[in-house]
Amino acid sequence: MSSLSTMKFYFGSLSMPIISTLKFCVIMMTLSTFQAFSANSHLDSGDTKIASTTTANVTQSQQVMAPTEINKLNKKIAKAVQSLVSPYSQLAIAIWDPQQQRSLFELNTQKLMQPASVMKLFTAVTAIAELGHDYRYRSQVFIKGPIINKALEGDVWINLSGDPKLTTQDLSRLIAQFKYAGIEKINGQVQLLTTANEQVRAPGWVWDDLGICYAAPVSRLILDGNCILAKLIPSQNGIKGETRLSISTSSPIKVFNQARFIPTSSNKQSRDLCQLSLARFDNNQYKLSGCYPSDGGINLAIAVNDVEPYMLAKLEALFKQHQIVLKHAINLLTDDDSALSAQFNEASSSKDEPSLVSDDEELRLIASHSSESLMAMLDTMLKDSNNLIADRVFKTIGRSFYQTTHPQVSDNFTHASKAQLARLNEMGIKLDSANLVDGSGLSRYNAISAAQLMSLIKLIYSDERFTSLDSALPEAGVSGTLAYKRGFQTKLRAKVKAKTGTMLGVANFAGRMQTSQGDLYFVILENGINPHQQAQHQVSSELLTAIMAIYETNEELQAD
């Protein structure tokens, strides 16, 4: 049994992390030297390149706006950018006017940047195109054999499809159907279908993140987000500093707790040096150590490490809870056998309704649970920046795309990436220079440009298949990750709908801004931010506020 990782924690709300350690294995894509304000260099490509006499160069279309007007607008926007940008970070900006179909400002739009969670926009568009708005995940229970004296003289197959919102309560209702079917004992085998050698984490995920729930394993087997909530509280033995871990008794994990609290009144150096860490071991065993400044308790969110033993333990507990006796332990069964999969498909009715009246020798469906629709999931994914939903949907895209031509393709991130690139290319989103590794943006191997992301934004608002995504985006000061974000509570409130993308050293935004002169689409990608200053970082909100003011008061724009 070997230790796998050291972990940071979420304390309190899962959407408001407090990082106890900054040990990130950051693997950065090579970025060219930031020369945003070189008066003699051109920025990116476009219909027309203007060598501005100001501190920035901007690409504009001569067909829509005369060069003299471009320069006037450039000077104002470039001045705003210059006053806000850090000399240490890399910045890429694209501003588009959809009414006039013209680019208002472009900076470093061809440079590859780490997208973080704005990657979820690519996932959302591809998912709708490939799976459809009403796609649902189905969890099913099949049986075969006669029922004699309340005992099933045959086998059971539990087929979970990777519903990212499946809860213990949902699974409990599935198991309860055995009693409704008149089954109180199972003499045959109970088998949980699984995928052989499933890739549950994407390449490039930061090692230190893997014990945290926002980096929970993405599997066919998902329950309660593959996340375990716990609370570290002072020990009841009265010994100063000692702690105990409060965790649900139904959670089949084991945590060895050696953590301690120090008073919040301790000096700053003591508080700064006090850190918690979690070592992960095989079979969902963990060791919590270190210290944390607290006079009360802290909430923890621990990612399941090994999904298969976790799900087996949960199922066994639910069978026991519903007083259904199992003659044998629950087994894992890989469904790579296409003939077996075909039997399950045939046994599922077209309406996905269980049927208890059937030949005892036939495979029959006795319980089924359907997830909410894909659009409902995408709403949660975008508003809350839910990584598990994003990566589960991403992998589903891959399996769906290849199921006809290459049914042997496994459910993994590599195949999903190829499928997504192919799908986006069909829709005119050219990503030859990009690198798409996962659906959530967690991977440090992801790399996209502002120009590529702007192409996607234009597609979302021009193709009726995707316009519904606008309502799923976080709204400044109102919903999702923008509800309480600094800088979005006053002038931008209810006027910006955008996907955020934040990780250590990264702060990205992409979406739509309402102005009195009409909407603007924007992409702001900033990488290489000083992590010690990131909490106070407000470049995007200040830049959008400045651009709104410039756009609304520009005489040339009003004259068009």
Image (tube, rainbow, N blue to C red):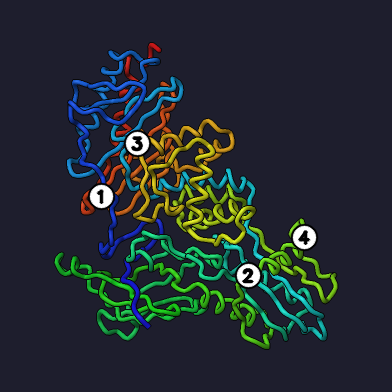
**How would you rate the neighbour count of disc 3 (Cα within 10 Å): few for under 14, some for 14-19, many for 20 or more?**
few
Q: Quadrant of the N terminus?
A: bottom left
Callout 2–callout 4 Cβ contact below 8 Å: no
Q: Of callouts 3 and 1, which one flags the residue occurring earlier in the amino acid sequence?
A: 3
Query: In this rendering, which labeled residue sits more in front, label 4 or label 1?
Result: 4
Q: Which residue is mark 1?
A: 534
* Rendered location of residue 159, percent (x, y): 65, 68
Give the residue displayed 38% in from the left and 56% down from the top: 443
Question: Dot 4: what SS?
Answer: loop
* Rendered location of residue 23, percent (x, y): 26, 64
Q: Of callouts 3 and 2, which one flags the residue occurring earlier in the amino acid sequence?
A: 2
Q: Quadrant of the C terminus?
A: top left
Q: What count of labels does the image hold?
A: 4
Query: In this rendering, which labeled residue sits more in front, label 2 or label 4?
Result: 2
Q: Of callouts 4 and 1, which one flags the residue occurring earlier in the amino acid sequence?
A: 4
- Disc sitting over residue 490 in the figure: 3
User: Whole-Å distance between the Cαs marked 3 and 2?
Assistant: 54 Å
Disc 3 residue type? Answer: Thr
Disc 4 residue type? Answer: Ser
Question: Dot 1: what SS?
Answer: helix
User: Whole-Å distance between the Cαs marked 4 and 3?
Assistant: 53 Å
Q: Of callouts 2 and 4, which one flags the residue occurring earlier in the amino acid sequence?
A: 2
Disc 2 residue type? Answer: Asp
Query: In this rendering, which labeled residue sits more in front, label 3 or label 2?
Result: 2
Seen in the picture, residue 531 relative to 103 is either above or below; the reply is below
Give the residue displayed 42% in from the left and 49% down from the top: 436
